[in-house]
Amino acid sequence: MTDLSDELLPTTRRALLHRLAVAQSEGRAPSMVAGVLRDGRLVWSGARSMVDGHAPTTDVQYRIGSITKTFVAVLVLRLRDEGLLDLADPLGRHLPGTPADGATVAQLLSHSAGLAAETPGPWWERTDGALRPELADILEAERPLRHPAGRVHHYSNPTYALLGALVERLRGEPWGEVLRREVLEPLGMDRTGLLPEHPHAGGFAVHPWADVLLPEPLTDTGRLAPAGQLWSTVADLAKWAAFLASGHEKVLSADTVAEMRRPAVAPEPGDWSETYGLGLQLIQHDGRILHGHSGSMPGFTAGLWVSEADGLAAIAFANATSGTRTAAVAAELLALTAQHEPRIPEPWRPLAEFDEQLLALTGPWYWGAAPHSLRLTADRGLELSVLGRAGRAGRFRAEADGTWTGLNDYYAGETLRVVRAADGSVSHLDIGSFVFPREPYGPAEAVPGGVDPQGWRVY
């Protein structure tokens, strides 16, 4: 075990090492390496190996499989944020001539374009990319679609090959070079790339009925590389996990990263524990919502999960084709850390400054007869809470024009306005056309449809 910090308690470190050791032993993995982050910093790492005294460090490369897709999604969203495409654009507007011309960029990112899960021909993960030199080779010409676009979530590796090609078309250079310049270098991820560099683990298959090994081929998958080609290390993916928690000014804003982890599609039928955002998997585990991705390629499995609520992330790699459930191990390492050392909240502090006019907006408001309360938060934000048994809560961000934009749940993206009477006094709040006056159904002139002139009564 390599312990990077004394911040975790000895009991926590032992629990993490025990979980990793059990996973390596029971999963019969030639090696496993893992790490845990707290508040963006790697605070623990551990490793186990079949070779005594030769456990991998956080600088040893493993193949990360479909975690690659999270990097490709970031490249696409950078294009969107620069105004070079819109998520509602059909792929054919920018990359014409593929079987997915009518699918939108958002559908491709969220695996809801309806494309086939895999390529035609031999198993693409174990065969050279030269077998599929063109985009037309990655999907069946006769039946590329398995579902109507936008209807269901259907995980598709060729989909991300198309997104990698989209990046190449709009940037005018190979997607791997774009990734290096626009993402890896700004984040300091110099041990992440398309091909392995020493030191790196070798990939193995473990015989199902005997404790013997078979080396797996290390192939360059060519056009399919955006679906799962990358190699990385625990130290590098720790930087990636920190980015997926809060963004980075030179890569993607925190708001765009938050957009990635919002569910973009409904869960698959019968499975309400997992869904997909824009390039990120979202799962429920041990009562918490995690975002990140699992990954596998012949000889390797990987998992990376982030818990925004806990300020934690965890990473796990193994160099075996199957048997180790590495993504589950990463989620369990995160949960163990949260259980042993729950997040300590920041001390309460008063606002550094406030506006008297905003302070006057706080307190009770009513949607019809349903009582709510409004409180002032940092940066001129507002928080609406439900006081009774009915209503909707929401958090709102202040805008430069004097309005507020909803940040979550029902009011996400909706506008909150303060409506004033002719004398300048506050009449009511308008939230996406819902009227919130200071008293139930009053004043009458502010309530849509008016109020019965006889007012409240007893029957």
Image: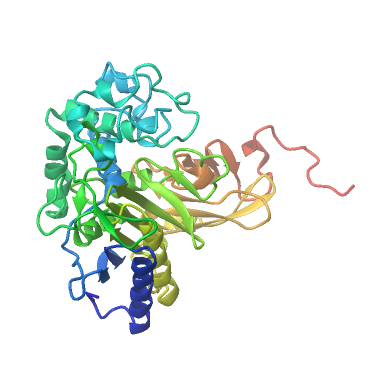
Question: Across the whole image, how many numbered discs are drawn on residues?
Answer: 0
For residue 349, say whether it is visible: no
Quarter in which the N terminus is drawn: bottom left
Expressed as whole percent of the image width and height from the top left, the position of residue 124 reads 28, 35
The vertical placement of 377 against 433, above or below, is below
Q: How are the residues colored?
A: rainbow
Q: In the current view of this chain or complex, which residue is farthest to the right?
A: 459
For residue 226, say whether it is visible: yes
Q: In the current view of this chain or complex, which residue is farthest to the left?
A: 198
At horizontal 78% and vertical 43% (from top left) the residue drawn is 455
At horizontal 25% and vertical 69% (from top left) the residue drawn is 50
Q: Report the front residue among 117 and 11.
A: 117
Expressed as whole percent of the image width and height from the top left, the position of residue 117 reads 39, 33
Q: Report the front residue among 340 and 135.
A: 135
304 sits to left or right of 131 = right
Which quadrant would residue 333 be assigned to in this image?
Answer: bottom left
The vertical placement of 336 against 149, above or below, is below
Q: Report the front residue among 292 and 217.
A: 217
Expressed as whole percent of the image width and height from the top left, the position of residue 358 reads 44, 54
457 sits to left or right of 52 = right
Q: In the current view of this chain or complex, which residue is farthest to the bottom?
A: 10
Which quadrant would residue 436 be assigned to in this image?
Answer: top right
Expressed as whole percent of the image width and height from the top left, the position of residue 359 reads 46, 58
